[in-house]
Image (spheres, helix red, strand yellow):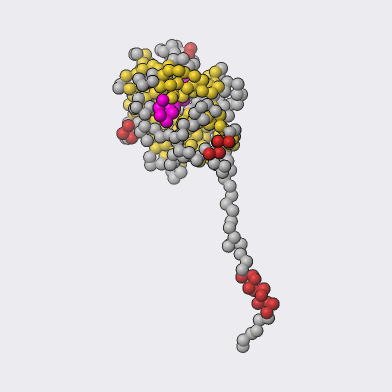
């Protein structure tokens, strides 16, 4: 029998059909918890670090991380200076070992010594050049993971402990050589060079380009290769230097780019990178300091742990940061400056 539905009840049913159920409504995804803070000092930083940028920790449990280098097919190599091992991380496979021992093949180093591997850079033919503190040399790791000495002496004398390195656009290699890998540093009886230098290597010849810094550390070139930035990791003189690069590769017109000696936050000027616009990302007291090419401090990426180095990864707009026991990353709005062999 056909049943007549009253008009009022029909109206209520029709109204109800127009309402969204809980499953129809948009569900807000929880925001990622940031592993640090972003200090925005100048308004122009907003065009570099998006408003919704988040610092993420991707791996942890290490001793002292350094030297991040993005490698095909989408993995990050990094050093553990105290752990004396080179590792890689990927979102799919997590953390695996690349080289152990990574920076010192000997024995008897005091616990806590900075003897392990440090900075690395992509080399020709898919190789990697790696700084080894304890072995006091730069080595080349080829595609088959075979390790061979690349540079270990200047004028017949052993290097101190190569720390970081970068290729100039012309193909020459620049690197720093502080004494951190030596147990007593400058006072170590095994130290053969009286200075801590910055070097240029080209055509199988090693050239000293600076010996004026007490603790030369991280270094990076401007996009056109006409400027070299060098960090000085000295508690008494926490500075980043800026040098003009002459056509013969030598340095001139050295000036202080930024001075943070008065800053009491944990950390020293250390590793650095430059983006395609010429902005400088320099690890230092309290985080990664972002500078305009004219030296203006735009902001700081303050990771949960004190950073020591940084490097570009993913599609070139992600900055990976090595900081004490962890690896962090942050997505930016600008592209990083690519290396010569990347």
Front residue of 188 and 139:
139
Q: Which residues are magenta?
A: 216-226
The residue depicted at 43 percent of the width and 21 percent of the height is 244
Query: For this view, does 25 lie left or right of residue 185?
Result: right
The residue depicted at 55 percent of the width and 38 percent of the height is 46
Q: Dividing the image into 4 quarters, which one contains the C terminus?
A: top left
Count up the numbered dots: 0
Query: For this view, does 232 lie left or right of residue 174?
Result: right
Magenta-colored stretch includes residue 135: no
Q: Position of residue 118 (x, y in %)?
A: 44, 27
Q: Position of residue 307 (x, y in %)?
A: 53, 30
Residue 309 in view in this figure: no
Front residue of 8 and 70:
8
Above or below 32: residue 221: above
Above or below 139: residue 314: below
The residue depicted at 58 percent of the width and 62 percent of the height is 24
Q: Quadrant of residue 148?
A: top left
Magenta-colored stretch includes residue 220: yes
Q: Position of residue 324 (x, y in %)?
A: 53, 31
């Amino acid at each position: 029998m056909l049943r007549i539905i009253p008009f009022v009840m029909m109206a209520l049913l029709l109204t109800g059909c127009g309402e969204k159920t809980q499953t129809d409504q948009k569900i807000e995804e929880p925001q990622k918890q940031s592993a640090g803070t972003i200090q925005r000092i100048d308004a122009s930083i907003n065009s570099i670090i998006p408003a919704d940028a988040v610092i993420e920790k991707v791996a942890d449990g290490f001793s002292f991380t350094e030297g991040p280098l993005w490698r095909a097919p989408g993995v990050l190599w990094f050093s553990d200076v105290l752990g004396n091992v080179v590792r890689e991380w990927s979102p799919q496979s997590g953390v695996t070992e690349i080289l152990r021992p990574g920076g010192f093949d000997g024995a008897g180093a005091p616990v806590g010594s900075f003897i392990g591997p440090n900075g690395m850079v992509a080399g020709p033919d898919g190789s990697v050049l790696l700084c080894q503190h304890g072995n006091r040399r730069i080595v080349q790791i080829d595609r088959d993971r075979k390790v061979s000495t690349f540079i270990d002496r200047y004028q017949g004398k052993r290097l101190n402990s190569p720390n970081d390195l970068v290729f100039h656009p012309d193909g020459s290699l620049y690197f720093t050589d502080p004494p951190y890998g030596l147990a007593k540093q400058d006072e170590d009886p095994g130290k053969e060079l009286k200075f801590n230098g910055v070097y240029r290597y080209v055509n199988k010849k090693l050239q000293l380009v600076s010996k004026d810094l007490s603790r030369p550390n991280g270094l990076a070139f401007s996009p056109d290769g006409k400027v070299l930035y060098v960090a000085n990791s000295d508690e008494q003189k926490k500075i980043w230097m800026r040098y003009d690069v002459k056509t013969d590769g030598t340095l001139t017109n050295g000036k202080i780019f930024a001075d943070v000696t008065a800053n009491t936050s944990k950390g020293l000027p250390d590793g650095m990178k430059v983006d395609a616009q010429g902005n400088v990302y320099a690890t230092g007291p309290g985080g990664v300091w972002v500078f305009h090419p004219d030296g203006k401090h735009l902001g700081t990426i303050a990771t949960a742990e004190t950073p020591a180095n940084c490097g570009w990864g993913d599609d070139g707009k992600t900055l990976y940061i090595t900081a004490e026991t962890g690896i962090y990353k942050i997505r930016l709005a600008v592209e990083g400056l690519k290396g010569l062999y990347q």
